[in-house]
Image (cartoon, rainbow, N blue to C red):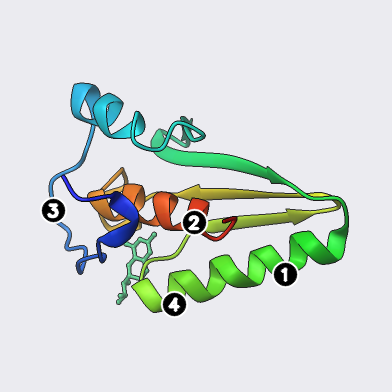
Amino acid sequence: MDDLNELKCEACVADAPRIEGEEAKAMLEMIPAWEIVERDGIPQLERVFKFRTFKQAWAFSDKVATLAEDEGHHPAILLEWGKVTVSWWSHKIKGLHKNDFICAAKTDSLCD
Ligand SMILES: C[C@H](O)[C@H](O)[C@H]1CNC2=NC(N)=NC(=O)C2=N1
């Protein structure tokens, strides 16, 4: 499979297949800095990014927001002093879609 961060998100439709179980575990190995957390019964990809200042965290949040708009796929972004928590999941399917793994990989690339 190509590097996830080189792929583009596809339009997510309500009957799109969820990625779960062994398939999710395998794809998670491609984005090792992320974990799958469950909130309100919905699995989400989550990573905490640490920064020395709030301004740096804010600037990173902006980059993630721009990435989301470019991909038409949107995360939860929690901006705090010195850190940003990014969570990706697909609202339409209340679960994880390939888009979420692609966007997590692209989020990592923002730190390069
Ligand atoms: C119409 C619009 O493209 C869709 O509603 C998109 C917007 N961004 C999205 N982002 C996420 N994370 N999940 C979605 O289901 C979703 N749907």
Find out if the beta carbon at label 4 lies less than 8 Å from the nearest ligand 1 atom: no
Residue 79 lies in quadrant:
bottom right
Let me know if residue 90 appears in the view: no
Q: Which numbered marker is on residue 59?
A: 1
- Quadrant of image for the N terminus: top left
The reply to whether dot 3 and dot 2 touch (C-beta < 8 Å) is no
Estimate the x, y position of residue 2 in percent, counting from the top left. Answer: 20, 50
> Across the whole image, how many numbered discs are drawn on residues?
4
Estimate the x, y position of residue 84 in percent, counting from the top left. Answer: 69, 51
In the displayed structure, 66 sits above or below 23; it is below
Which residue in the rendered view is the most extreme toward the front? 112
| Point 52% across, 76% down: residue | 66
Q: Which numbered marker is on residue 22?
A: none
- Helix, strand or loop for disc 2: helix
| Disc nearer the start of the sequence (3/4) | 3
| Point 47% across, 70% down: residue | 67
- Ligand 1 is in which quadrant of the figure? bottom left
Between 58 and 17, which is closer to the camera in this rendering?
58
Residue identified by numbered label 2: 109
Q: CA distance from mark 1 to mark 4?
A: 16 Å
Estimate the x, y position of residue 76 in percent, counting from the top left. Answer: 55, 56
| Point 39% across, 49% down: residue | 89
- For label 3, the crowd category at 10 Å Cα-Cα, with few meaning under 14, some 14 to 19 and many 20 or more, is some
Q: Which numbered marker is on residue 69?
A: 4
Find out if the beta carbon at label 2 lies less than 8 Å from the nearest ligand 1 atom: no
Q: CA distance from mark 2 to mark 1?
A: 15 Å
Name which residue type carries label 4: Glu
Name which residue type carries label 3: Ala
Residue identified by numbered label 3: 16
